[in-house]
Amino acid sequence: MSKEKKDVRILAFESSCDETSTAVIKNGREIESLVVATQIKSHQRFGGVVPEVASRHHIEVITQITKEALEQANTSWDDIDAIAVTYGPGLVGALLIGVSAAKAASMATGIPLIGVDHIMGHIMAAQLKDEIEYPAMALQVSGGHTEIVLLKDPTHFEIIGDTRDDAAGEAYDKIGRVLGVNYPAGKTIDEWAHKGKDTFNFPRAMMEDDDYDFSFSGLKSAFINTCHHADQIHQELNKYDLAASFQAAVIDVLAHKTLRAIKEYKPKTFILGGGVAANHGLRDRLNEEIEKLPADIKPKVILPDLKLCGDNAAMIGAAAYNLYNEGKFSDEHLNADPSLELPYADRMLN
Ligand code: KG4
Ligand code: ZN
């Protein structure tokens, strides 16, 4: 008689920025529960995330949403095989709330602890949608990161391209502010872009360079200068065309470099990850361009569900399952690391 493989249930915590989230994930693929408590309303009047405000909100909700995640999954501590938590990168005070909660739960119950890199989590949101075949490649685009990442296997990653200045999401939020859009601006700018035309011809930086790095600060400055100049001469610009022109410039650069990287590294799976992965223009463009590739180098494309593009604990549980399978547990010394870098994620683990 064949012995059935035991299910692995992971309770995961995420608190690196402005969402407090808990989830129970089965076998790294199935979401049994996911709770996301967003604080965006509290930060909007400041035009961005205020770290102290973020930490206070995390403390207020983390115990309650831990209970909710277990209840919604119809499970109890006895059924949990590991406790996972984001330990970096992010805001140190915010990370510390999740790390302390996870460590306390692990010590009180004896359930093993797994520290997870937030970016590894964003990329592993793909695992909740479809099976990732390795080697894989990810374009990771969020508020703090714009990276092209190679995945040798589920836990060994290498960054081959990075932003030299602003991250893509950060650029969206900054130009959004000039247009009077509430933080975070990406979703609204994406919607406006679909109503306008690319008429401003903003710069596409580093397109011809033979590396995989990005730069968005020139684009951001060109955008802001265009708006300020129009203000000075009392000229009204079409906000939809401005959004469409900005988005076209961002997508042109991201798609160009990503396609070149796919042609060079020939991954079996391509993953789009991070908050900006919710961008409809970017999703459509990458799908279209990858579809045109010759069959022998065309990777399988995984675009995570829209609700799993932003920060959430489900993706942390998915990434933690891969670390669990390799026995990469953390101990009571696990600490928040605000500038944790992906290729070195393993160093903090036992
Ligand atoms: O991954 P995330 O939730 O937080 C970080 O880890 O940074 O990403 C948040 C970023 C924000 O900058 C937000 O404006 C951007 O993702 N974003 C978008 C869209 N939805 C969210 N950017 C472009 N288009 C969208 N549809
Ligand atoms: Zn994130």
Image: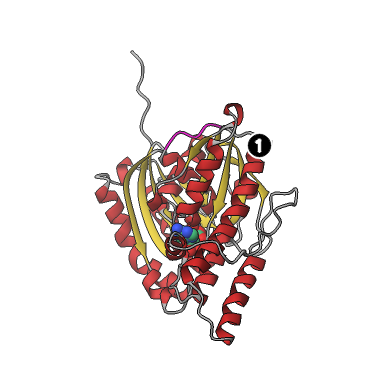
Q: Nearer the viewer, residue 304 or 89?
A: 304
The spot of residue 336 in percent (x, y) is 54, 60
Q: Nearer the viewer, residue 248 or 283?
A: 248
Q: Nearer the viewer, residue 138 or 100?
A: 138
Q: Is residue 38 visible?
A: yes
The spot of residue 330 in percent (x, y) is 52, 48
Q: Main secondary structure of the magenta part?
A: loop
Q: Which residues are magenta?
A: 130-134
Within-10-Å neighbours for mark 1: few <14, some 14–19, many 20+: some
In this rendering, is residue 143 above or below 121?
below
* Amino acid at circle 1: Lys
Residue highlighted by disc 1: 263
The spot of residue 309 in percent (x, y) is 44, 52
Residue drawn 66% across and 59% down?
A: 204
Q: Nearer the viewer, residue 218 or 154?
A: 218
The spot of residue 51 in percent (x, y) is 49, 72
Residue drawn 60% across and 75% down?
A: 226
Distance from mark 1 CB to nearest ligand 1 atom below 8 Å: no
